Image: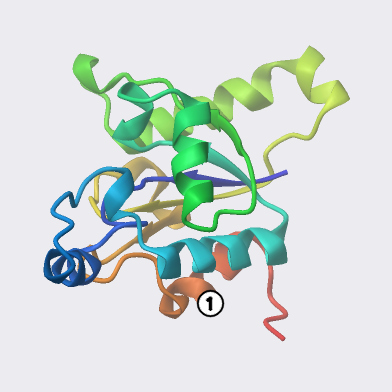
Amino acid sequence: MKIIFLDIDGVLNNEVHYIKQLKAEIKQYWGPDGLDEDNIKVLNAIIEKTGAKVVLSSSWRLHFKLDEIESFLKEKGFKYTIFAKTTSYIGVGCSRGDEIKLWVNEWNQDIEYVKDNDAVTHFVAFDDIDDMEVIKENFVLIDDDLGLTEDYLPKIYNILGIYDLS
């Protein structure tokens, strides 16, 4: 199973989109109003090509229910479902990278569950904050000025084991 660990702020909303929104009198950058449909189209394309499942690693998981987040995303064109979310251990000294590593390890160690389902074989984490040292080979640092764009696709596909880019 392939997994995308998804941050939202700076990945699916971005500074350039925010500036455009200000001109349209929409003033909320972080949050559902700030989601950029173009960034979501790129996410959809990644999922379509790789078959990856989305696990939410964003701090949004602490403020909204998963079905609410999924609804916000779908309003902006997201075509898929959110598979799960990571547990927050940041308050006890863990980085987001630590949380992701723990999620993958716990998923793959649950032998009874993995027998009936897929083990995680490939995963990628998108984030605009680089606190991912423990998973650096699986990490793509996103520029929060533009969010998730097609420029990142070759690296993302490589991490997820997709080498034919045609």
Residue kind at label 1, given as amino acid type: Pro
Q: Position of residue 118 (x, y in %)?
A: 79, 35
Instruction: Judge left or right: residue 112 versus residue 3.
Output: right
Taking depth in this image into account, of 115 and 79 the one nearest to the observer is 79
Can residue 34 be seen here? The reply is: yes
Q: From the viewer's perspective, is residue 47 above or below residue 94?
A: below
Q: Tell me the quadrant of the picture where the N terminus can be found.
A: top right
Q: From the viewer's perspective, is residue 151 above or below residue 155?
A: below
The residue wearing badge 1 is: 154
The answer to which quarter of the image holds residue 51 is bottom right
Q: From the viewer's perspective, is residue 157 above or below residue 30?
A: below
Taking depth in this image into account, of 48 and 161 the one nearest to the observer is 48
Instruction: Judge left or right: residue 39 versus residue 93.
Output: right
Q: Residue at x 13, y 54 (%)?
A: 27
Q: Position of residue 68 (x, y in %)?
A: 46, 30
The answer to which quarter of the image holds residue 117 is top right
Q: Position of residue 129 (x, y in %)?
A: 23, 50
Q: Residue at x 39, y 66 (%)?
A: 148
Q: From the viewer's perspective, is residue 77 above or below residue 75?
A: below
Q: Residue at x 24, y 68 (%)?
A: 17
Q: Residues within 10 Å of mark 1 (few under 14, many from 20)?
A: some
Can residue 85 be seen here? The reply is: no
